[in-house]
Image (cartoon, rainbow, N blue to C red):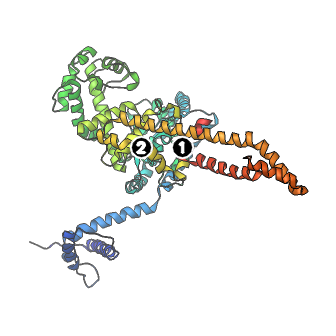
Amino acid sequence: MTERSYTEEEIQDLTDRVFLLKEKLEAGKMFFAPHLADEFRKSFDAIRLRPDGKVDPRTVDGRIRASTLALMAMKQRDDMKNSASLQDLQEKYFEFLYEQLGWLYDQMVHHKAPPHAIANHFSEQADFVEKFSSFIPEFEKAVKDFWEVAGEISEYHLQDGQQLKSVFSGDLFPAYDENVVSTAGLYIDTIVLPCPILRIAPLAKVLPKAEVVRLLIKHVLTAMTYRNLATANVSPPIVLVVPSRDDIQGRGRKELVARAEPAMVKHGNRLFGSSFQELDELMEFCNGLRSVEDVVARLKCPERLLFDTEWGGDAAHQLRKAMTKNPALPGMAEDVAGHQVIGACIGRMPQAMAAEDAAFQFGGSPLISAPTSWNYYTWLLEYQGATARNQAGSLEACHVARALTAEAGANLEWLGNVPPESVLEIRKNGHAEELRGLLSNGLSDLLKANPDNYFRTADQVVENLDLAFRKHQRELSEAKQKKLKLYGIDVPTCLAVGGIGVAGAITGNVPLQGISAALGAVGLATLKDIKTKYVEIAAADKARRASPTGILFRHLAK
């Protein structure tokens, strides 16, 4: 067997790696399992140098080579992280958005209009749509070029961070009137949002120009409202815009659809009580279901025939609505009801898998506010034989985040829309853990009993917040009574008593001083008492306002 020859470049690379290994060993930054330590030391001691000071590659075995490759990868990762902070990257990203579309944002602020109103206005102007559409490819390329570098650095920062993370999925971008920081941000440390430009620009291939312009303006303007939160000097960051690898690399849906095929088949089996093995079998079966009645007659699990939770109604109602609203997939007929069933499988299951992928990429849990998308995500986990704990995320975090987003418009509507600035204040004041404990109280036992019961844990989160609100209101009421007593009842009498004392001190009138002392003795406060009590009440009031619940519920009094 001939001995392998090495180029000088390869030898230099190996030398650099071996000396990096030596540096880490000497610094005590490498640890080995007891049964591996001796063999590794033998391999390391066997390394020899050439006369020129470079490593002799013949003396470096596979154990050392593998270790040095891993070390070099970690060093490169650290070097990339050290090249830019998350805050630096967010500032650059938002700076670019404001340079390009700041004039639109200024109009939105000036007219006090929501993003969708601005988007609707401009997307109805034909000349504007043509000009803006021609600008989109260049806009997309510039953003993609930025994220090809910044995305990897951001990913490393997030993966290495130990904070609780949630990755927004299930829609193009969060709705303007549902700031995710105001809900999930009460529990989650860092919320990762997608880049709306990379999400929407590719839709130009399938949607009319006016619709692409409308969506892009609407969601980019919404993203721009997160600037102050994303660039805030707080660690860990509250919210970040960081696209997934798939969004950056522009991967098509083909790979995702192929990976989601087993889940699609299982969904079809659940719907019809069948035992399909391949997607083609399911498609062939659905081809024969021409009418709504044909589909409904074969359903064994009608509650999973879901197109949009907002439509309400039973399976038949959902399907009829879909046939009038949803376009058929290429190669499928709009008047064949079974094709809508296939369309839901092919559209929803890959989307749910993309949510799972993005969460795993950043080391977090999916944050899915859209009810329909959430249902399909939980069904995907069921078909995979997994629970909703997510491979990289916290089960408890997933449950609380889901409860806060799902209940914000229902059982937590009384809470209102917590100003994002309040969440930032809670974080800066160091109250995040205290608030997290309040929200998750009592969840551990529920999760042990049934880790997939999101309805019960949502009820518990609602109850926790309700109890906290009632306690806060009670404390405010008690504080108010103390102030009323201080200012409304004791104050006039105390002022009189204090006046007598002052007069006695000035005039030297002993009887007056005696009266003052006597009045004080029977329980009426002196000026000194008022000052002391006022300071105490003011301190308690200040502490209450700065507490997590004080900040959280502050907007309700307005």
**Quadrant where the C terminus is found in the figure:** top right
Which residue in the protein does label 1 denote?
Answer: 549
Q: Residue at x 35, y 50 (%)?
A: 363
Q: Position of residue 178 (x, y in %)?
A: 49, 35
Using the image, tell me which numbered label, if any, was put on residue 470: none
User: In the picture, residue 35 is in which quadrant?
Assistant: bottom left
Is any part of residue 331 visible from this angle?
Answer: no
Q: Residue at x 25, y 24 (%)?
A: 301
Which type of secondary structure does the marked residue at label 2 adopt?
Answer: loop
* Left or right relative to 460: residue 417: right
Q: Nearer the viewer, residue 300 or 487?
A: 487
Query: From what the image shows, is residue 456 above or below residue 93?
Result: above
Query: From what the image shows, is residue 141 above or below residue 328?
Result: below
Q: Amino acid at mark 1?
A: Thr
Which type of secondary structure does the marked residue at label 1 adopt?
Answer: helix
Query: From what the image shows, is residue 485 above or below residue 72?
Result: above
Q: Nearer the viewer, residue 527 or 299?
A: 527
Is any part of residue 326 visible from this angle?
Answer: yes
**Quadrant where the N terminus is found in the figure:** bottom left
User: In the picture, residue 399 is in which quadrant?
Assistant: top left
Which circle's residue, 1 or 2, is located before the other in the chain? 2
Crowd class of label 2 (few under 14; some 14 to 19; many from 20; radius 10 Å) = some
Q: Amino acid at mark 2?
A: Asn
What separation in Å lies between label 1 and label 2 (alpha carbons)?
15 Å
Q: Nearer the viewer, residue 94 or 27?
A: 27
Which residue in the protein does label 2 denote?
Answer: 441
